[in-house]
Amino acid sequence: MKITRSLAALTAAGSAVALAACGTPSGSSGGSGGDGDSATTSIVWDMWAGSEDDIADLEAQLAIAQEENPDLDISLQHAPWNDYFTKLTTNLASGNVACVTSMNGQRLSGYHEAFLPLGEEELEIAGIDPADFTDGALDIMSYDGTLYGMPYDAAAMLVFYNKDRFAEAGLDEPQAGWTFDDFDAALEGLGADGTAFGMGMGEFQWMALPIARAGVQPVDESGALDLTNPAFVDASEWYASIAADGYGSIPPSASDTGWGEQEYQAGNVAMAVDGTWNAVSYLNNEAGFSAGMVDMPSQDGERLGLVLGSGYGISADCENPEEALRVLGSLVGETAQDQIASSGRSYPARVDSQPLYFESLDEAVRDEVRAAFEAVFTGLEGQRSTDDWAQVNEALQPNLVTVYTGQSTIADVLEQTQQQFGE
């Protein structure tokens, strides 16, 4: 982990380029905790939220941070996921980034310069011990060897399956440690009527299986785009063949970005790939089927999975970095992490809070979900990405439908994208 320049220097620099949204002293009439003779420092926390339940969970965490920092005035601003990063880009251009800003790990590469690097000094001020977090979790908020934030959750990709469909087909359910031969056998047993598997459109909804099969990421260890790595191309061609051979449900258009997982949720397909963050939603699906989950298959005894997730960072231009670090420490602290776990909203990054996630589940599925999570969170490595990784995926996604329908090949799509974005 790189050690940052001193906070004293950062604070001095921040005072010279103070940003109103990052954190400002407010008078006695402008914030809580102040009196007539003193000012209260205001810290803004920016986060995405897609529903009233999401907002309620965030407000519960805000209350925890406020209680642990009574001398600060902490406020929450939020936007739906699809709008959040557009808003963040606009705020960056106008110099109006919130002091505590939430970031999805897969998108960090494109925004890392907006965040304060976190070294030993910063973590000490925040009261954070990295040893309290699950193995690999710090990779979620790291880029090019530097830590830019702390994760609040940890995630990995799973194969979700419909137990009822497997039973109807007379097939044994997938078990932890299964292989790609087992996966292919399941497809064949489920039948080539287009309902065995939901073809993915999202970044890891389609990439997770090729990555696991190839044993390589589409970005090499130097950080260079590597979409044309022969092993990755071969594995991607296998993935595309699921649709070509009649086993995959094909999205009607490029705008159906959540196709595979939506088809699974509706009970229209027997299997789909999605993240651990949706485990509870699938267990409680409205279609009424019995949902199961299992880790990625292995190839030749090896299985490559990536640790994913999201976290919180401090704006590089925050006027009050020390106060913001204290808020960050509270948001990933034990009490807030326990709240996240108990809500079942996501799997917490803090190890001691993780058992509460399973306790939040119905007793009938608790042990099964715990076993699946224990399997999938073993042997993961951090995702590698390029500075323009979001643009790479935006270029790939519209072409996936043409691949699934046989109008183009995945090898050509990967080659074209490599030429466009590769060095």
Image: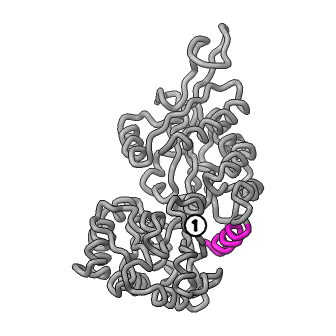
- Residue at 39%, 83% (x, y): give it: 247
The vertical placement of 128 against 27, above or below, is below
Q: In this view of the protein, can residue 11 be seen by the observer?
A: yes
Residue 275 position in % (x across, y down)? 54, 64
User: Quarter of the image holding residue 7?
Assistant: top right
Residue 169 position in % (x across, y down)? 52, 85
Q: Nearer the viewer, residue 221 or 289?
A: 289
Residue 371 position in % (x across, y down)? 71, 72
- Residue at 28%, 68% (x, y): give it: 252
The quadrant the C terminus occupies is: bottom left
Residue 371 magenta-highlighted: yes
- Residue at 42%, 44% (x, y): give it: 84
Question: In the rendered image, which residue does mark 1 sit on?
Answer: 156
The quadrant the N terminus occupies is: bottom right
Q: In this view of the protein, can residue 315 be seen by the observer?
A: no
Q: Nearer the viewer, residue 423 or 48?
A: 48
Q: Which residues are magenta?
A: 367-381
Residue 120 magenta-highlighted: no
Residue 186 position in % (x across, y down)? 51, 86
Q: Nearer the viewer, residue 287 or 155?
A: 287
Kind of residue at disc 1? Ala
The vertical placement of 182 against 404, above or below, is below
Label 1, secondary structure: give it: loop
| Disc 1 packing (10 Å; few <14; some 14–19; many ≥20) | many
- Residue at 50%, 63% (x, y): give it: 287
Furthest residue in direction top, as rendered: 36
